[in-house]
Image (cartoon, grey):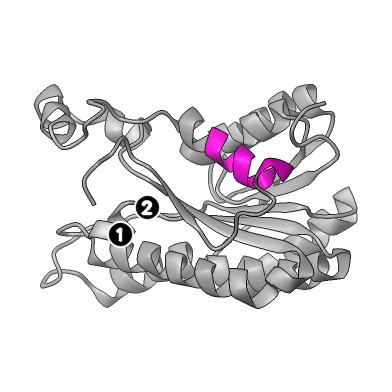
Amino acid sequence: MKLLEGKTALITGASRGIGEAIAREFAEQGACVAFTFNSSEERALKLEVALTEKCGKAKAYKSDASSYEATEKLVNDVISDFGKIDIVVNNAGITRDNLILRMSEEQWDEVINTNLKSVFNMTRHVSRHMMRNRCGSIINISSIVGMKGNPGQANYAASKAGIIGFTKSIAREIGSRNIRCNAIAPGFIETEMTEKLDEATREKYFENIPLGRFGRPQEVAEVCVFLASDMSSYISGQTISVCGALNV
């Protein structure tokens, strides 16, 4: 039996990168997969087809994770289409990097709303459904930057640190209803963003990573499977770093 067979997962921001890897691995492990995208419609629809071939049922939803109303509609639509939500992965996120003296209010607000408020939006709207079913796993994608900080990323670091505090609080708040809430803090992961780095810059980053390489999206996805499955049934309120021993 596959690890997520019989479960339905909702993943935000899954049309590319880490989110796409999570969606693919969940489908491989037998979950029905609902996922969101914001702008990459063509790519999302291709992923929907690929996931459906793997797990039998998958659907892409265009939704703005930073919108409270849009998230409420999304949760209702997924429950209507799939019948239930067992797993949520809050993965939607952006960067708007700048030094604090140059950072605009808009850059701050956009990152906080997309990265942190979105986690509140989803948890607020899905928790009642999970509480009614007395089961659920909520997985929040934070970042190693939320644990150690990074120059030029005060907004991003604040949003990802906030996710960790939120995760611990929610785990305590709704754990009595058999709902678990955990966070994953990826380090440097091979994505479209890191692929643009020149070799000298990559080597400089590698010097601070004892494993000597960037991580793969698949490696984050596999931790997500563990936290989504019954293998982690007594793990809640935790943050798991996937960072190659990058010094925090």
Whether tag 1 and tag 2 are in contact, CB under 8 A, the answer is: yes
| Mark seen at residue 81 | none
Tell which of 178 and 78 is nearer to you: 178
* Residue 168 as seen in the image, left or right of residue 35: left
Camera-nearest residue between 7 and 66: 7
Other residues around mark 2 within 10 Å, as few (<14) / some (14–19) / many (≥20): many
Q: How far from the left and from the top, in percent, is residue 63?
A: 63, 57
From the viewer's perspective, is residue 231 above or below residue 112? above
Pointer 1 local density, CA inside 10 Å: few below 14, some 14–19, many at least 20: some
Alpha carbons under labels 1 and 2: distance apart: 7 Å
Magenta span: predominant SS is helix
Label 1 sits on a secondary structure element that is helix
Q: At 79% across and 54% down in the image, what residue appears?
A: 85
The image's mark for residue 143 is: 2
- Left or right: where does residue 193 sit relative to residue 234? left
Which residues fall within the magenta stretch?
222-231
Which of the 4 image quadrants contains residue 71? bottom right
Of the 4 image quadrants, the one containing the N terminus is top right
